[in-house]
Amino acid sequence: MDNSRTKSAKINSITASSVQFLSLITQFIARTIFIFTLGESYLGLNGLLTNILNILSFSELGIGAAFTFLLYEPLAHHDENKISALVRLYGIIYRRIALIIMSLGLILMPFLPYLIYGKTNVVGNIYLAFFLFLLNTVFSYLWNYKRSIFLADQAGYLNSLNTFAFQFGAQITQIILLLNWPNYYIYLVIQILFTIASNFQISKMIDRKYPFLKNKIVHKVGPATRSYLKKNVIGMMSSKLGGVIIFSTDNLLISAFLGLVSVGKYSNYTLILSGITNVVGQGVGAVTASIGHLNVTAGKERQNSIFYKYSYLSGIIGLAVSIGLITYFDPFITLWLGSKYVLSPLLTWLIVVSFFITQLRQANINFTNAYGLYWEQRYKPIFEAAINLIISIVLLKLTNLGISSVIIGTIISNLVINSWWEPMILLKYGLKNNIVEYAKFYLTQLVSGVMLITMAQYIVRTLSMASDIVKSTALTTLIIIIATMIFECLVIFYGYPKSAGKISVVGIVVHILQGRKTKEKYE
């Protein structure tokens, strides 16, 4: 890897991480102002409508990733004709997706009252709110497809800066308006205007950097490329279907069975979780390119060794964050919004355990992405989504568990399907190894982690220091250190495969970085 590519990778990574962190802070500020000016019912409606549009946008999943991959080669060889052909095709597909989403949204609109438990007049005109949300999503597809060029050309930092600048501008404008004229519809109109401005600006930047895209000569994509798109886009869409259904239907189910207030309270926790997940993902996912290179240049023994080290590191990070969440959620929510927004101990425990189980999947997910094994696990999301929805709905109807029903559905679908299906595909088609060693390793991580999370919550609740933020911070830090050390010992002595070599957190980081150096050597 030459210096310019290394420099670009560092700039993209640092920019993305910094922007994600700053964006998280502004989201917290905007959320706080939103709650205290419009109330928790509007917060719940906002979460519900966001989830509905995420589901309607399912048709886009996989297409962006596929086109970004296809642009690598022509950009490297400065093949302007092929780049133009791909961008043109991408634009046509996105405009069709926008039309599909608009049509589906208009068809769904009359049924909105059936998705909300209780009276809807407390949040004004839900049809107008949904239509504004729908417009924002549709407008995002007008020029958004051009962002893939920056991502493929190692200029992703320009996309990150553009996104953050306009999101920040929108949130500041919304905050000012909410403080002076607390109106939800004006809030949504501001969102639409900044979405259009962001995409218009990115389009102008692309046209300036790649002027040949404005050439009116039409170039067509070849049959080989079209064949790739048909197969791999389907595989990618299928692999992401489970995530969309599971995470985007949570608020939908909660709203339909419990009401908008419950959606609002739960969405405060998911805001924190999604923010932390994105920040952690910037670091943990940064080695995906190195993993892909190992598939080409290294033997299976070394690949398996790095896989287990990477899995172990993901587990350590997941546990540390989970312990922080289980011990700090109550005092943080109390300080931020007030004690009435704190969820029950059982629900908090379920949310954190679900987060931890998801983090244990990260190594499998990143290795699967790096090895391109989308097609091989195309059926998994169907079973995952079905189990999740069935269990969630049954528990919501037959029990008084409330929001916990939805989280239990997610946990069970993860354990029953993802815990063995994802590693089975990876080990069979990618790493060429058996699943017995992995099963022992995974179960050790899972049991140890859940046990430590449970103990940490018990200790914190027994000491009852939720009202003292300073003492809570000190206690959380101490518990994280001790729990992490115990977790390391249990996994190393009882679950870590001997064939993967010696293990330590520092050793893992060095090992992964060595993989990147090997990549540089071959390139």
Image: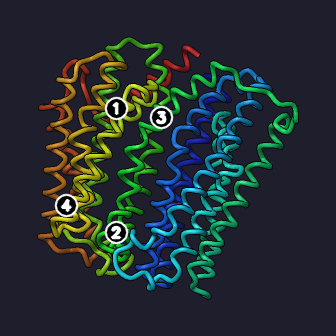
* Mark 2–mark 1 CB contact (< 8 Å): no
Q: Name the residue located 25 percent from the left edge and 52 percent from the top edge.
A: 390
Pointer 3 residue:
236
| Horizontal relation, residue 458 to residue 168: left or right | left
Name the spot of residue 56 as percent of width and height, x first: 51, 54
Number of marks present in the image shown: 4
Name the spot of residue 74 as percent of width and height, x first: 71, 24
- Name the front one of labels 2 and 1: 2
Q: Earlier in the sequence, mark 2 or mark 1?
A: 2
The picture quadrant where one finds residue 120 is bottom left
- Secondary structure beneath label 1: helix
Q: Which mark is residue 256?
A: 2
Q: Earlier in the sequence, mark 2 or mark 4?
A: 2
Which amino acid, mark 1? Tyr
Location of the N terminus (image quadrant): top right
* Mark 2–mark 4 CB contact (< 8 Å): no
Q: Earlier in the sequence, mark 3 or mark 4?
A: 3
Name the spot of residue 165 as percent of width and height, x first: 66, 60
Q: Is residue 426 above or below residue 247?
A: above
Which amino acid, mark 2? Ala
Q: Earlier in the sequence, mark 3 or mark 1?
A: 3
Pointer 4 residue:
395
Q: CA distance from mark 4 to mark 1?
A: 36 Å
